Image: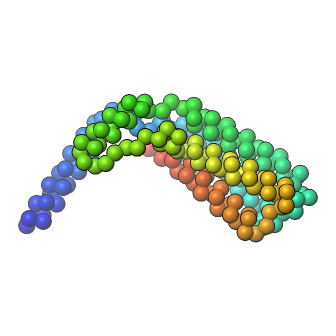
Amino acid sequence: MLQRVREGRLLALCIGLCAALSACMVQLAPSYDSDIVDGLNGANQDIQLLFAQIGTLTDPAGFPTRKPQYDKIVGELGAVELQIRTRPIPKPEAIKKAAAAIQRLNIGGVTLDPNFSAYPSARAVHDLQGTIVKMEEVDEKSGLRGAAVAAFQNQAVTFLSQAMTYENYLKR
């Protein structure tokens, strides 16, 4: 019986907390931008096409034919990162107030890291662009082989997934 009373109180607390937080007008994430999502989708298609064309082995002699694809992808990613970084974001003061309110409720806090928290998808896009640039350097110098292709592809997919998931989540 005592257990049910505790569960009921916990449920009431959770419902009350949700109601209080939903009534709060503090925006803690940037607004959804379909242009950013479209840019990520375009870059994703170009990256997947590049990996499909590379397969598991490239010869440096064929690099000049792949160079335009690398340039297009790096350019797309640079443009998307700039769009993300120039999008209006919540004011740090609002995030600090929300963090203080959350701490008063003994839930935890919101960590402010302007290089990550404010722009998590920009960081993923930046890291993805770095991965593609490094892949291009290796491809030009010595070609790409099995394990290297798989490593670059896994890293690219990870960064793409992070950026696309965050940006699509903002549509909520």
Q: Residue at x 68, y 39 (%)?
A: 78
Q: How many marks?
A: 0
- Position of residue 33 relative to residue 47, above or below, is above
Q: How is the image coloured?
A: rainbow
- In the picture, measured across the screen, residue 122 lies left or right of residue 19, that is right
- Position of residue 22 relative to residue 94, above or below, is below
Residue placed furthest toward the right: 61
Residue 16 at x, y = what percent?
A: 21, 45
Q: Nearer the viewer, residue 118 or 162?
A: 118
Picture quadrant where residue 17 is located: top left
Residue 130 at x, y = what percent?
A: 69, 49
Quadrant (top left, top right, bottom left, bottom right) of the C terminus: top left
Q: Residue at x 73, y 44 (%)?
A: 74
Residue placed furthest toward the left: 1
Q: Is residue 45 visible?
A: no
Q: Residue at x 16, y 60 (%)?
A: 7
Residue 49 at x, y = what percent?
A: 74, 55
Residue placed furthest toward the bottom: 146
Quadrant (top left, top right, bottom left, bottom right) of the N terminus: bottom left
Q: Nearer the viewer, residue 134 or 67?
A: 134
Q: Residue at x 80, y 63 (%)?
A: 144
- Position of residue 82 relative to residue 160, above or below, is above
Q: Is residue 2 visible?
A: yes
- In the picture, measured across the screen, residue 137 lies left or right of residue 92, that is right
Residue 105 at x, y = what percent?
A: 23, 45
